Image (cartoon, rainbow, N blue to C red):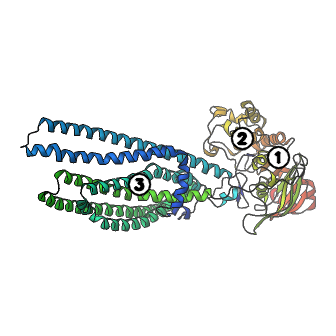
């Protein structure tokens, strides 16, 4: 299907529309999800995306093990040096013997090699985890974007585009931080803690108990910090969502803000929301600012205990200076992983919340099911038939009530009616963006629910009132990525619908890069590009939804000329408020509050003196 514009009618997006709905300027429930700091089920699902890279992950685990082991070896070398050649030299009056000097040089060389090896292992560990994180992000983004492409239009009715963009960008970025730093750092920190504990107990179990005597207090402080940090993080996330929503809405509505001179009041609101976010963020900073000094104080107590006990033991001759140095050296390393895990708490919490939001989208069923073939033989190619179609976007607020009509191959049918009568709903149902609650819609005698959606939509070309143009070249906007459409055909179609005359005036003509939504083009020029796009894709059915509603008289003449060429040999449905554009229609269907009230030619309907006549009189009085 060729989509050439967007429109909202009947309170719903038109066919192929990207809804212009925005998040309300308030807290968005999905964006303030905090979730558990660690959710085993979610983590299991995330790790499945890392499964294709399990070989690289195994390498990373080996690198972590190697780096952890080497991290213990360095202080052990210092312990050996202190209790070995250095102690012997001191006992000998401070003079280094050649043997002691050789031992010190050997231990120094070993320490240098261990340090270099440790740095190399940490480099490859960080590099490989970053590669895994980026690949998982790549796979997740592709899966999420593909899933969103297959979602029915009704899904976008209740999900603002801004929120979905957040899912596919910042939420997946949060998962990258988890894989690139959070998971590996947590594993490494746990391994370091275990290795240090084992090393301390192996050197001196008694002094190890003194070192770890502060652990109960540390665990208590960490528990309080985690609870407060979670609460502050929730508040911070909520205010950030509010700030993002208000910012997006204000920028999109900047024209209205400036038109009604609401810059000052809008700025005041923004400052208030921004201030609330600042205060929430400061609370999070306060929690960390209290926690880390508390850890340092406990570390100082542990150091005092080691020096007190260690000094007594050295005096008693049951502890060496090397062993005391070993404990003092490892004390800082023992508390560092605990501080690191506290810093990673928000990373883990953000990743779990992001994963919950992402999987909520991925778990939403895709599209509408395809019914099994009925076995019916296709009828004449190009026929459309609505059979007693009832449809409501919500509950029983019917947009269509028992609509029945047929469009024969090559016939041009016009649909008219007041805003909200159900005109655009017919397009949405024909293109199968929605399914009717009752009745059926047949194309070539086959129910649309039996068609492959891509095959069905490929046969339909739609030109809407608000033409959607991408930030690409003119040629790409006509071709829409269809490689089968040659450069010659693009130019021939543009020439055929009178679009080439303005294209050639553009800088770089067909290679001119359009601004967002074709902002530098006039409404008429956008419409002509839309006609060129529809013609280039050569659809069997052509649907024109208010295609000339906002076009000046001169451009309308060009479009009417293009229409005559475009409609030849195609079944077409034309929706218009400007009745002058549909006088040539074979039949005109008049909709009123979702019901078909009148059917006939322009002349026949005028003679009846019904709803169509009233519409005609209102427009030309």
* Quadrant of the rendered image containing residue 59: top left
Mark 2–mark 3 contact, CB under 8 Å?
no
Picture coordinates of residue 475 (x, y %)?
68, 35
Residue at 73%, 37% in the rendered image: 499
Camera-side residue of 296 and 207: 207
Which residue: 38% across, 64% down? 283
Q: CA distance from mark 2 to mark 3?
A: 55 Å
Give the Cα distance between marks 1 and 3: 59 Å
Q: How far across and down, in percent of the image, does residue 322 sit?
A: 19, 50
Residue for point 30% across, 41% down: 115
Residue 541 disc label: 1
Residue lying at 27% horizontally and 65% vertically, measured from the top left? 213
Q: Earlier in the sequence, mark 1 or mark 2?
A: 2
Q: Is residue 493 left or right of residue 353?
A: right
* The one of 395 and 354 positioned closer to us in this rendering: 354
Q: Nearer the viewer, mark 1 or mark 2?
A: 1
- For numbered disc 1, what is the local secondary structure? strand
Q: Which residue has dot 2 on it?
A: 529
Label 3 packing within 10 angstroms: few (<14), some (14-19), many (20+): many
Q: Image check: 250 left or right of 415?
A: left
Q: Which of the numbered marks, if any, corresponds to residue 186?
A: 3
Q: Earlier in the sequence, mark 1 or mark 3?
A: 3
424 lies left or right of 360:
right
Mark 1 neighbour class, 10 Å CA radius: few under 14, some 14 to 19, many 20 or more: many
Question: Considering the numbered disc 3 on the image, is that residue within a helix, a strand or a loop?
Answer: helix
């Amino acid at each position: 299907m060729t989509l050439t514009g967007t429109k909202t009618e009947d309170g719903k997006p038109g066919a192929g529309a990207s809804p212009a709905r925005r998040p309300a300027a308030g807290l968005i429930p999905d964006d303030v999800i905090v979730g558990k700091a660690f959710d085993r089920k979610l983590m299991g699902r995330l790790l499945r995306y890392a499964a294709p890279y399990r070989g690289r992950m195994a390498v990373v685990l080996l690198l972590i093990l190697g780096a952890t082991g080497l991290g213990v070896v360095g202080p052990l070398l210092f312990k050996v040096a202190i209790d070995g050649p250095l102690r012997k030299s001191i006992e000998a009056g401070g003079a280094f013997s050649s043997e002691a000097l050789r031992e010190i040089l050997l231990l120094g060389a070993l320490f240098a090699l261990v340090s270099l090896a440790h740095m190399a292992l940490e480099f490859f560990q960080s590099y490989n985890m970053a590669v895994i994180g980026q690949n998982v992000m790549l796979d997740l983004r592709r899966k999420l974007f593909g899933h969103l492409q297959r979602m029915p239009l009704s899904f976008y009715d209740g999900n603002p585009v801004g929120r979905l963009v957040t899912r596919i960008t910042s939420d997946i970025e949060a998962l990258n931080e988890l894989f690139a730093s959070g998971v590996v750092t947590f594993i490494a920190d746990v391994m370091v803690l275990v290795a240090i504990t084992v090393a301390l107990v192996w050197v001196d179990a008694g002094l190890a108990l003194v070192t770890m005597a502060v652990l109960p207090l540390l665990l208590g402080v960490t528990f309080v910090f985690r609870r407060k940090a979670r609460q502050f993080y929730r508040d911070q996330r909520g205010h950030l969502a509010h700030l993002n929503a208000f910012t997006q809405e204000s920028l999109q509505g900047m024209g209205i803000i400036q038109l009604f001179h609401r810059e000052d009041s809008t700025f005041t609101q923004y400052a208030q929301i921004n201030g609330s976010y600042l205060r929430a963020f400061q609370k999070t900073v306060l929690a960390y600012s209290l926690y880390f000094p508390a850890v340092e104080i406990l570390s100082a107590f542990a150091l005092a205990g080691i020096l007190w006990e260690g000094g007594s033991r050295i005096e008693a001759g049951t502890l060496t200076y090397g062993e005391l140095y070993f404990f003092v050296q490892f004390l800082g390393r023992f508390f560092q992983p605990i501080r690191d895990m506290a810093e990673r708490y928000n990373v883990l919490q953000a990743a779990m919340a992001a994963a919950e939001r992402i999987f909520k989208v991925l778990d939403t069923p895709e599209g509408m099911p395809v019914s099994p073939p009925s076995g019916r033989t296709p009828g004449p190619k190009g026929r459309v038939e609505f059979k007693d179609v009832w449809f409501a976007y919500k509950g029983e607020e019917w947009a269509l009530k028992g609509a029945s009509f047929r469009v024969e191959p090559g016939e041009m049918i016009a649909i008219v009616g007041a805003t909200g009568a159900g005109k655009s709903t017919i397009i949405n149902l024909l293109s199968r963006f929605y399914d009717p609650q009752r009745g059926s819609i047949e194309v070539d005698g086959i129910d649309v629910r039996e068609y492959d959606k891509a095959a069905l939509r490929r046969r339909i070309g739609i030109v809407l009132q608000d033409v959607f143009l991408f930030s690409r070249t003119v040629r790409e906007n006509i071709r829409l990525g269809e490689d089968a459409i040659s450069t010659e055909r693009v130019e021939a179609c543009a020439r055929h619908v009178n679009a080439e005359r303005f294209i050639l005036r553009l800088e770089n003509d067909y290679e001119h890069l359009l601004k967002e939504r074709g902002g530098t083009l006039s409404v008429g020029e956008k419409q002509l590009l839309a006609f060129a796009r529809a013609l280039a894709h050569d659809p069997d059915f052509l649907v024109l939804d208010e295609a000339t509603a906002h076009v000046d008289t001169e451009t309308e003449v060009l479009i009417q000329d293009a229409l005559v060429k475009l409609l030849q040999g195609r079944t077409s449905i034309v929706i218009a408020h400007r009745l002058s554009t549909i006088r040539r229609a074979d039949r005109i269907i008049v909709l009123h509050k979702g019901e078909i009230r009148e059917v006939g030619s322009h002349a026949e309907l005028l003679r009846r003196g019904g709803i169509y006549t009233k519409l005609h009189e209102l427009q030309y009085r």
